[in-house]
Amino acid sequence: PGDALLKRKVRSEFIKRELDSTQLEINVIHGVAYLSGDLRGTRARRVPDWKRELAIIETIIMTISGIRGIDNRIKCFDL
């Protein structure tokens, strides 16, 4: 799959987990997902352990066919 399709698939994983990724920048270059910016919980879902949540998301992203790696520079916040 092309990088643009992979980028959409990566963003959809944050949406599936009910996280506010509007301030999150996602780029995929040659199969490597570059993640930066702010990630927030929502009113519907507060995140008690951001470190664990990001580990889960990274594990899910690595299962996407075509993703070869992740460079994660996300900052996490609650509402």
Image (spheres, rainbow, N blue to C red):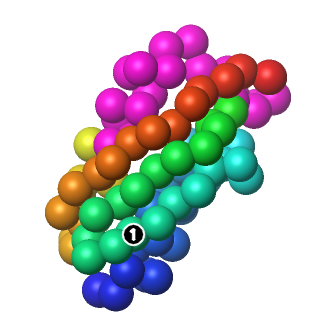
Task: Give how far across and how far down residue 76 sits, in percent.
Answer: 59, 27
Q: Is residue 23 visible?
A: yes
Q: Residue furthest left?
A: 68
Q: Which residue is mark 1?
A: 28
For residue 48, which quarter of the picture? top right
Residue under the image location 51 percent in, 72 percent down: 8
Q: Is residue 54 magenta?
A: yes
Residue under the image location 33 percent in, 48 percent down: 71
| Magenta part of the chain | 41-58
Say left or right for 40 vs 72.
right
Task: Give how far across and how far down residue 33 sits, in percent.
Answer: 36, 60
Residue under the image location 59 percent in, 20 percent down: 47
**Quadrant showing the N terminus:** bottom left
Query: Is the residue marked by circle 1 packed among few (<14), some (14-19), or many (20+) residues within 10 Å?
Result: many
Q: Is residue 33 magenta?
A: no
Q: What kind of residue is marked 1?
A: Val
For residue 68, which quarter of the picture? bottom left
Task: Give how far across and how far down residue 29 sits, in percent.
Answer: 34, 73
**Quadrant showing the C terminus:** top right
